[in-house]
Amino acid sequence: MSKKEISSDFPFESNYLEVKGSKMHYVDIGDSSAGDPILFLHGNPSSSYLWRNIMPYIAGHGRVIAPDLIGMGKSDKPDIPYRFHDHYAYLTDFIEQLGLKNITLVIHDWGSGLGFHYAHQNPENVKAIAFLEAMLRPLTYAGFEPKFRFAFKAMRAPVLGWLMVSVANMFVKQIVPQAIVRPMTAAEKEAYAAPFPTIKRRKPVHVWPCEIPIDGKPTDIYDLMVAYGQWLQETDIPKLMFHAQPGGTITVEVAQWAKEHLPNLTSVDLGEGTHYLQEDYPHEIGEELANWVKKL
């Protein structure tokens, strides 16, 4: 874990952009005159708050932008299905409205699925991709440890999953703390919980686990993940991978696969960690990311 202080503060000005009739919240720091845009994309059940201790390292190297996905963080919570394609439609509109060109993506969790898919569909607009605990390829239940296999099967069950995630709020209260090595502070727990105070507002958190392509389902997300996974093995776009042990989505085995199959990849081993590596190693990630961005 990081030896420097890990702050719970979020000292950034809030910006809002109207997208499809709803407001999306985002952080916008740095200066475009210093370089191209660097777009940070979070996953479930987080927000731009996840990047709070990392973004300052990058602000001197371009325009740093970190949105809250629709329905998450401080963004509006419209009554939509919150499937992958819904998030993607809001994200692409967000990118187009801000006029972001030659983007460096910094992506995590479902932000990686969205980011990889965007890069595959818009390679001419993507300069480089940095990723951690990302979704590089579809999953199988056989590849899960037994306790995680049970948890994901339960969360994807219609009634039980709703009770676990939407009613009991287990993703925010249990999964996030368990996927961080260090103890979370009360302020950090509150920041993660604040966007999801009610059952209705937890809909995105509930839907995301059901979107993970496991054993080929759901088929539409499986197909696009296979497609961008193949593209990642062919493109020479610069890539930076952060990984840890045992990891979550990027296990030791997946990290080794990436090293062997992804061209133009730089790999950084952070040490012990599972899924929310930004909360255990923000300073190490920030320093490595800044050095990598400078060389692009």
Image (spheres, rainbow, N blue to C red):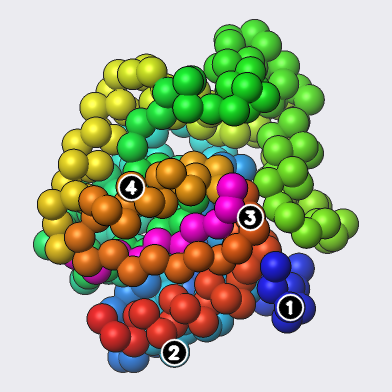
Residue 211 placement, left or right of 173: left
Tell which circle, 1 or 2, labels the residue nearer the N-terminal end.
Answer: 1
Q: Residue placed at 19% from the left, 49% from the top? A: 233
Name the mark on residue 257. Answer: 4
Q: Which residue carries the number 2 mark?
A: 60
Residue 103 placement, left or right of 8: left
Q: Which residue carries the number 1 mark?
A: 3
The label nearer to you, 3 versus 4, is 4
When asked about the image quadrant of residue 164, the answer is: top right
The label nearer to you, 3 versus 2, is 3
In the rendered image, residue 283 lying in the magenta stretch gets the answer no
Q: Residue placed at 61% from the left, 43% from the top? A: 45
Q: Is mark 2 on a helix, strand or loop?
A: helix
Tell which circle, 4 or 1, labels the residue nearer the N-terminal end.
Answer: 1
Tell which circle, 3 or 4, labels the residue nearer the N-terminal end.
Answer: 4
Q: What residue type is labelled 3?
A: Gly
Residue 295 placement, left or right of 22: left
The label nearer to you, 4 versus 1, is 4
Question: How many angstroms separate mark 3 from mark 4 (CA)?
Answer: 19 Å
Question: How many angstroms separate mark 4 from mark 2 (CA)?
Answer: 33 Å
Q: Is mark 3 on a helix, strand or loop?
A: strand
Q: In this view, does 236 lie above or below 274?
A: below
The region drawn magenta spans 237-246
Q: Residue placed at 28% from the left, 35% from the top? A: 225
CB contact under 8 Å: marks 1 and 2: no
Q: Is residue 146 above or below residue 268?
A: above
Q: Nearer the viewer, residue 48 or 262?
A: 262
Q: What residue type is labelled 2?
A: Gly
Q: Where is residue 99 in the image (x, y as percent from the top left)?
A: 25, 67
Q: Which residue carries the number 3 mark?
A: 273
